[in-house]
Amino acid sequence: MMSHQVFGESETIFGYKGLNIQLYYHAGSLLTYLNMEYHEQIPRSYGIKPDPVIPKIVEQIPQGFISNRDEFISKLEKEDSFTPMGNKIHSYFHDDTEYEIYEADIFTPRLKEYHERLQTFILWYIDAASFIDIDDEKWHFFLLFEKKKSVAPIYNIVGYMTVYHYYSYPDKFRPRISQTLILPPFQRKGHC
């Protein structure tokens, strides 16, 4: 996991002992919880301020995150009713688990908000990653979900791919893969 895109090349945070940053996502809906705890902070009498940890992370994640842990936990059960957006284009089984691939574009309901939360993962897992301009209608998205069997199916995000459709003279478009991310628990399992 990398943090240099948020905390600088040295990936260090100054001014705390026992720092614990908590950035949790619901595995399907990506409802987000952000908080931090520490045992000790550098005393103000030293005339040095600790690094502004939460504000630096808040610059990178979309609004709407929750900072109260009890509130986050109380919403988790409702979030299990999350369903993927877009058109299901493929499904397959791997180790007795079903996976589904959905295709979406910027006109797909709920996609923009979902992608804003999803793309934050690239900061932690792709070196020199950058966010895309979600308002450009030439972007297409492929979302891979794990489908868990339950009374109602429960969907967990596995990864995603962004594809940009470049204009190709005289009347064609050429798709180019921009970003691909498979989240760590699902890597090295043949998904990509």
Image: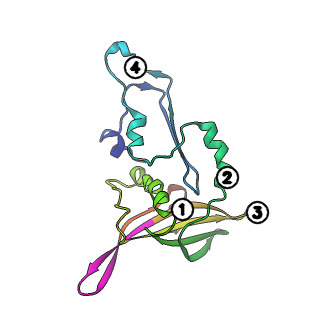
- Residue nearest the viewer, comparing 125 with 190: 125
For label 2, count other residues whose C-alpha is less than 10 Å away and answer few (under 14), some (14-19) or many (20+): few
Query: Considering the numbered disc 1 on the image, is that residue within a helix, a strand or a loop?
Result: strand
- Mark 3 vs mark 1, CA separation in Å: 21 Å
- Residue beneath the point at 73% across and 62% down: 150
- Mark 4 vs mark 1, CA separation in Å: 39 Å
For label 3, count other residues whose C-alpha is less than 10 Å away and answer few (under 14), some (14-19) or many (20+): few
Q: Residue furthest bottom?
A: 170
- Residue nearest the viewer, comparing 190 with 46: 46
Residue under circle 1?
A: 158
Which label is found at residue 151? 3
Q: Which stretch appears magenta? A: 161-176
Query: Considering the numbered disc 4 on the image, is that residue within a helix, a strand or a loop?
Result: loop
55 in relation to 160, above or below: above
- Mark 3 vs mark 4, CA separation in Å: 50 Å
Query: Considering the numbered disc 2 on the image, is that residue within a helix, a strand or a loop?
Result: helix
Which label is found at residue 78? 2
Residue 59's x, y, as percent?
A: 38, 43
Which sits earlier in the primary sequence, circle 3 or circle 1? 3
Which is more foreground, mark 2 or mark 3? Answer: 2
Badge 1 amino acid: Val
- Residue beneath the point at 49% across and 63% down: 111
Left/right placement of residue 115 relative to residue 88 reads: left
- Residue beneath the point at 72% across and 64% down: 152
- Quarter where residue 68 is shown: top right
Which label is found at residue 42? 4
